[in-house]
Amino acid sequence: MITHYCPACWREIAGTEAHCPDCGFDLAQDQALNFEEKLLRSLEHPVPEKRYLAIQILGQLGSQAALPGLEKILDTEVNDIYVLREVLVALSKIQGPRSRALLQKAAEHPFQTVRQLAQSLLARPAEPGAHT
């Protein structure tokens, strides 16, 4: 049987469901979302590789809409150094005052690796053609 995750609550559900049995989300609504909106939802995906990919693509897109979700990850993630790394790289690609402020916040992070990467990214000049 094919299963997938509800894009609203991330519960694993059967591929034949029209509505999530846990939260009631109409799965057809997910089809109406644009690509960026689906990526934004994926910031909370339970499969780490899906989260990494969403973060990477949002960074490449220069998605300002991703900043609240990326900040939430910075504030709450305590175990996954890899997702934190992807967040910092995405912030460096998004550019702008809010992303820079988040990088500065990350420069004070409890994890030394996160602090060092944030400081390194802050020291870099803006990339040509970067989103501002």
Image (spheres, grey):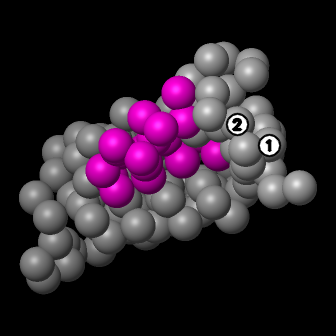
Judging depth in this view, the residue of 22 and 129 nearest the camera is: 22
Q: Are marks 2 and 1 in contact (CB under 8 Å)?
A: yes
The Cα atoms of the two marked residues, 2 and 1, are separated by 6 Å
Q: Identify residue for label 2.
A: 17
What's under tag 2, amino acid-wise?
A: Glu
Question: In what quadrant of the picture does the C terminus appear?
Answer: bottom left
> Is 115 part of what is drawn in magenta?
no
Is residue 62 visible in this depiction of the protein? yes
Q: Secondary structure at mark 2?
A: loop
Kindly identify the residue that appears in the image at 37 percent across and 34 percent down.
68
Image-quadrant location for residue 130? bottom left
Asked whether, in this view, residue 51 is left or right of residue 70, the answer is right
Could you say which disc has been placed on residue 14 in the image? 1
Q: Is residue 130 left or right of residue 74?
A: left
- x and y percentages locating residue 101 in the rendered image: 29, 41
Where does the image place residue 65, in percent across and percent down from the top left?
27, 42
Query: Most extreme residue toward the bottom, as rendered?
Result: 128
